């Protein structure tokens, strides 16, 4: 009997040794040792590669993993998702809270120069940047040119990704885990969180140490999102009292679905008053010249030629990028059930405001960069936002998702740049209030660098609503110091 137990133990031990040896080999094959454009030393380990999830054929989901610069064994692990739908999470990596700041190369069109980002979120947490769903960024599936998917399938695939990713990096399975994202990730985040929670309840292995989630300027509900613009425009002084009062009287508070001809006419006047502004941040300049078009970096689309001037016009050494497509819908067009048009498709009929993603496009399509980060040629040319998806919004309103998750005790931070006109803070403030939770932290300012950085209100069930003063749609891009401050405080459970 003793010999039998010893034999079983030895076989089991051998299996574990072999398994962990294989895991270490997988991780080592994903290690990034250098990045073209960067001449310094990494502050922590970086990994990238693919995780295959079920499909016919299988889907290869690409990730870039930055280990925390502080205390990797104990710091939280955060999955970051950009929106669209159809936009790469390298958007967050390059332009928002990744480990580097990117400066356009000289001459124009050459490889960008990378510097360490003093406000990287990897200062206080390990970060996974995931291209999701398949067909976005470097994620792909063999023999597929059009990717048909939707909210629920995307959440299921991302959950499968996480389970397999933790098998490759088992040393992080016990770390506190959070899911974060912005814009259409206002759908991605709560639906994925729901899938993770269901997996935990049913005992799916490995058991993820899920603690909560955060959403920035996120899609939530077509009524709340659709009704947000007119009050925002009035409050910001973009439309006069008289026009706002006309809209109130004619539309009776229903701006997302005009129920009379008179209401539609008045809302058209509102749109006209706002049409020259930068939808992503009304404080930033906007350039329009839709009649002058030029081919983009990879020849797969077109961008407005006058956008080439934007970097110089901001007069910032690492200027805030301007946006042209990818995360905003035309005014008063909230996300509804059914197929969602993508910006590359909308661009065929609309002139789209204010963006230039040249730096990311040049860097991520550079052959040496792609080799360094293990991006496969089969993924095709990298674009910020793909036109290859056929995407269905099939999860409905996010309100019930938020209710379910927060009543189960998971922490939630809903934050909004208060000058974003794409998903205005007025909608996020309204739906968080609509949950009916008790206020446990009265509306008050919060501070960064000894200055008021925005306002916050705390609710029961671990729900926090937060605004960031002067920030646009992508908060860490516009206010990096403030973003790192509220992010690190919230993760640590401190008062923001």
Image: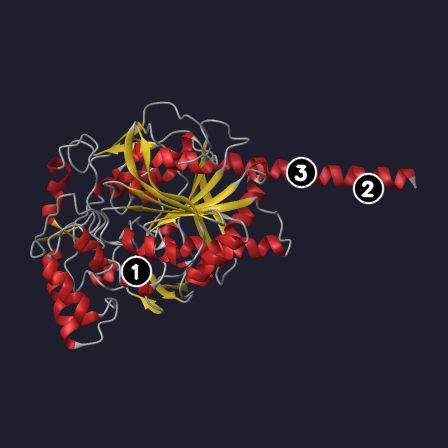
Kindly report the distance in space between the C-alpha atoms of the residues bearing marks 2 and 3: 15 Å
Reading the chain from its start, which is encountered first: label 1 or label 3? 3
Q: What is the x, y in percent for residue 186?
A: 38, 54
**19 or 317: nearer the viewer:** 317
Question: Would you say the residues marked 1 and 3 are in contact, meaning their CB atoms lie under 8 Å apart?
Answer: no
Answer with left or right where residue 318 lies relative to residue 492: left
Q: Determine whether the residue tagged by mark 3 lies in a helix, strand or loop.
A: helix
Kindly give the residue lying farthest to the right in the view shown: 1
Question: Would you say the residues marked 1 and 2 are in contact, meaning their CB atoms lie under 8 Å apart?
Answer: no
**495 or 15: nearer the viewer:** 495
Reading the chain from its start, which is encountered first: label 2 or label 3? 2
Find disc 2 in the rendering and name its residue.
8
The residue at 36%/69% (across/down) is: 337
Kindly report the distance in space between the C-alpha atoms of the residues bearing marks 1 and 2: 59 Å
Q: Does 254 appear above or below 308?
A: below
Q: What is the x, y in percent for residue 94?
A: 31, 39
* Numbered label tally: 3
Q: Which mark is residue 225?
A: 1
Q: Residues within 10 Å of mark 1 (few under 14, many from 20)?
A: many
Question: Would you say the residues marked 2 and 3 are in contact, meaning their CB atoms lie under 8 Å apart?
Answer: no
Q: Does 203 appear above or below 365?
A: below
Q: Does 330 appear above or below 47?
A: below
Answer with left or right where residue 401 lies relative to residue 318: right
Find disc 3 in the rendering and name its residue.
18
**325 or 255: nearer the viewer:** 255
Q: Which mark is residue 118?
A: none
Q: Does 396 appear above or below 45?
A: below
Q: What is the x, y in percent for residue 440?
A: 44, 45
Residue 149, by quadrant, is: bottom left
Answer with left or right where residue 183 lies relative to residue 261: right
Q: Residues within 10 Å of mark 3 (few under 14, many from 20)?
A: few
């Amino acid at each position: 009997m003793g010999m039998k137990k010893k034999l079983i133990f030895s076989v089991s031990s051998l299996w574990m040794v072999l398994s962990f040896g294989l895991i270490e080999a997988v991780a080592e094959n994903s290690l990034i040792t250098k990045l073209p454009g960067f001449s310094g030393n990494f502050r922590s380990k970086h990994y990238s590669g693919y995780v295959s999830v079920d499909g016919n054929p299988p889907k290869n989901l690409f990730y870039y993993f930055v280990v925390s610069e502080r205390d990797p064994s104990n710091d939280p692990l955060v999955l970051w998702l950009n929106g669209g739908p159809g936009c790469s999470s390298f958007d967050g990596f390059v332009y928002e809270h990744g480990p580097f700041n990117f400066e356009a190369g000289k001459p124009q069109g050459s490889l960008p120069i990378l510097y360490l980002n003093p406000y990287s979120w990897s200062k206080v947490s390990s970060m996974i940047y995931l291209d999701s769903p398949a067909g976005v960024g470097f994620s792909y599936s063999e023999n597929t040119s059009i990717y048909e998917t939707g909210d629920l399938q995307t959440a299921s695939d991302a959950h499968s990704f996480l389970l397999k990713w933790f098998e490759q990096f088992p040393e992080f399975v016990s770390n506190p885990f959070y899911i974060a994202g912005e814009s259409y990730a206002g759908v991605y985040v709560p639906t994925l969180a729901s899938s993770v929670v269901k997996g935990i309840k049913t005992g799916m292995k490995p058991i993820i140490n899920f603690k909560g989630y955060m959403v920035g300027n996120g899609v939530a509900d077509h009524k709340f999102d659709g009704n947000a613009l007119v009050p925002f425009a009035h409050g910001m002084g973009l439309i006069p009292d008289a026009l706002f009062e006309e809209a109130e009287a004619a539309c009776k508070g229903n701006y997302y679905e005009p129920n009379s001809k008179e209401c539609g006419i008045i809302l058209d006047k509102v749109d006209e008053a706002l049409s020259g502004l930068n939808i992503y941040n009304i404080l930033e300049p906007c350039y329009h010249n839709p009649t002058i078009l030029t081919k983009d970096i990879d020849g797969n689309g077109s961008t407005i030629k006058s956008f080439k001037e934007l970097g110089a016009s901001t007069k910032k050494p690492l200027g805030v990028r301007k946006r042209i497509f990818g995360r905003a819908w035309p005014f008063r067009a909230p996300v509804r059930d059914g197929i969602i048009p993508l910006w590359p498709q909308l661009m065929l009929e609309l002139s789209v405001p204010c963006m230039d993603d040249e730096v990311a496009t040049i860097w991520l399509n550079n052959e040496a960069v792609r080799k360094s980060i293990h991006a496969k040629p089969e993924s095709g040319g990298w674009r910020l936002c793909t036109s290859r998806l056929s995407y269905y919004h099939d999860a409905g309103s996010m309100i019930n998702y938020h209710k379910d998750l927060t009543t189960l005790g998971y922490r939630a931070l809903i934050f909004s740049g208060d000058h974003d006109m794409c998903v205005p803070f007025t909608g996020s403030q309204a739906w968080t209030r609509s949950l009916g939770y008790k206020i446990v932290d009265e509306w008050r300012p919060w501070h960064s660098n000894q200055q008021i950085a925005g306002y916050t209100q705390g609710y029961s069930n671990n729900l926090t609503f937060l605004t960031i003063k002067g920030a646009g749609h992508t908060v860490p891009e516009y206010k990096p110091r403030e973003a790192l401050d509220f992010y690190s405080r919230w993760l640590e459970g401190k008062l923001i």
